Image: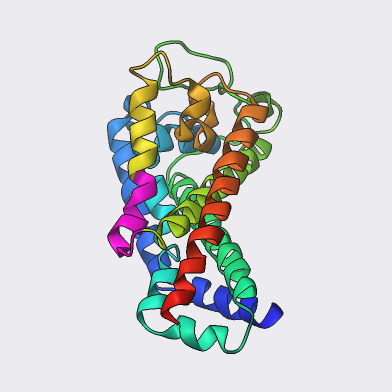
Amino acid sequence: MKGILKEELNRAFRNPRFLIVVVLALAIFGIGAYRSPILFEGQPGQPVNRLILNLEYGEFGFLAALLATLPFADSFLDDLNQGFLRQIVQRVPYRNYKAAKIIAVALAGGLSLVLAVLVIFLAGLVGGTDWESRAYFSGYAAKPSAPYGPLGGLYTTNPIFYLLYLLTSAFGFGAVYAVLGLAISPLIHNRYVVLAGPLVLVQVLNFLEGRSLHITNALNPLNGLMPFSTAYTLGTQLAQFGVVFAVSVVVFLVLARKGRLVL
């Protein structure tokens, strides 16, 4: 297991696609800085608040699932199509390969989202900043004193702690929806469906939540990614991530058994 995991991690992180993640993150920052009237006016000076507004106005939620799947979610298809899978199962048990694949895809997806958020945060440091400020500017009509959602009080206590929570949320979202893309790959042997499938699902649920009484905010994946945008609980966020991750892992383990038929 150790050898195949090391190989999968090397393939996942020695990957030029992370450069695309950085470019898209900078684009999100530019769009957010342009679209937010508060940021356009040079406010706020608090870097974490500036990050939140960039994520809201830069349509980070629209691209987040794609940023998660982009680095490595389609790697099972690559292994299958290029004959690499045949070589792997001759050296290691197939179950070890699948476990290593899940871990590598999850880590790549999670760290891809963390990288994107950090790039947006660091880009927001350009210009005047006020690390001591606790004032909170929101893109909504109501002006809360702190971000909505779980652990919002951390912002007023220490914004850096709240930044760490946002990075953890981004990692969880990225890991979960990267593995969802992986789960799609044994079912639909199409790279573009694997990469874009989670994005489509996320956007459909986000659309329905705003227009249906039957889709609550607990079912909107973007509330787990950006918990500051709605009334939300930490338990709901963890449950959402846990359910999607568990279902995706089971689906992949079951469907990937069919891959042995082509070995």
Direction from residue 189 to residue 144 in the image, left or right = right
- Give coordinates of residue 250: x percent, y percent: 57, 53
Establish if 36 lies above or below 256: above
Please state the extent of the stretch shown in magenta in the rendering. Answer: 188-199
In terms of depth relative to the viewer, which is nearer, 195 or 92? Answer: 92
Taking the spot 36% from the left edge, 16% from the top edge, the residue there is 212
In the image, residue 89 lies in the stretch drawn in magenta: no
Display coloring: rainbow
Residue that sits furthest to the front in the current view: 261
In terms of depth relative to the viewer, which is nearer, 87 or 200? Answer: 87
Taking the spot 66% from the left edge, 83% from the top edge, the residue there is 3
Q: Is residue 155 visible?
A: no
- Give coordinates of residue 262: x percent, y percent: 41, 78
In the image, residue 189 lies in the stretch drawn in magenta: yes
The main secondary structure of the magenta stretch is: helix
The quadrant of the image that shows the N terminus is bottom right
Taking the spot 35% from the left edge, 63% from the top edge, the residue there is 20
The quadrant of the image that shows the C terminus is bottom left
- Give coordinates of residue 243: x percent, y percent: 59, 40
Establish if 232 lies above or below 178: above
Q: How many marks?
A: 0
> To which quarter of the image does residue 38 belong?
top left
> To which quarter of the image does residue 88 belong?
bottom right
- Give coordinates of residue 31: x percent, y percent: 29, 41
Establish if 248 lies above or below 85: above
Direction from residue 88 to residue 194 in the image, left or right = left
Q: Is residue 4 visible?
A: yes
Establish if 110 lies above or below 186: above
Taking the spot 60% from the left edge, 36% from the top edge, the residue there is 131
